[in-house]
Amino acid sequence: MIRINGLDHIVLRAHCLDNMLYFYRDLLGCQIERSLPQLGLTQLRAGEALIDIVTINSELGQLGGAPPTQDGRNVDHFCLQIDPIEEEVLIAILEQLNITHSGFAERYGAQGFGRSIYLSDPEGNIVELKPNKEMK
């Protein structure tokens, strides 16, 4: 069974990085933890979780579709931390439930680098599942 422990990170798409940094860093007090400007990614620490900001005109931003609008998509995806589980076991559970997935890959999150898997909910929101660091 899959057990969720909390939110690892959320990825927001942005027109203007400076405006987002002013809001999340300067007004709300989130500190920049990691920045990969060549990809268009800035990661801010928000307690136990991260807020990732992806600029829409960047390499990563281009993967997310159209720019965010009042009535359009602004959240690229969110990541849930789950209890440690063997990759093969989680894949078997997802396949038994007929949930398509991306397969595991190494990614950076609130607990540092680790392997995670992407899937979509019934409304098409992208959900990343990331077993806690104890998982190998």
Image (cartoon, grey):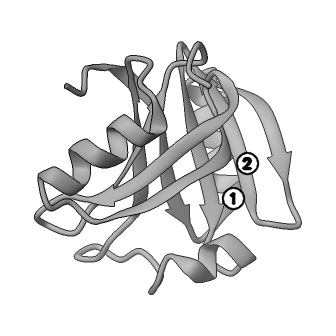
The spot of residue 5 in percent (x, y) is: 33, 16
Q: Residues within 10 Å of mark 2 (few under 14, many from 20)?
A: many
Return the residue nearer the eye: 28 or 2. 2
Question: Going 46% across and 50% down the picture, which residue do you hit?
Answer: 117
Q: Which residue is mark 2?
A: 42
Q: Quadrant of residue 123?
A: bottom left
Q: Which residue is mark 1?
A: 17
Report the side of 31 relative to 23 (left or right): right
Please, is residue 120 above or below residue 92 in the view? below
Amino acid on which the number 2 mark rests in the picture: Thr
Return the residue nearer the eye: 71 or 12. 12
Q: CA distance from mark 2 to mark 1?
A: 8 Å
Report the side of 113 relative to 65 (left or right): right
Q: Does the CB distance between marks 2 and 1 fall below 8 Å?
A: yes
Question: Going 59% across and 28% down the picture, which residue do you hit?
Answer: 27
Element on which disc 2 rests: strand
Q: Residue furthest bottom?
A: 66
Element on which disc 1 rests: helix
Please, is residue 120 above or below residue 117 in the view? below
Dot 2 or dot 1, earlier in sequence: 1
The spot of residue 76 in percent (x, y) is: 44, 62
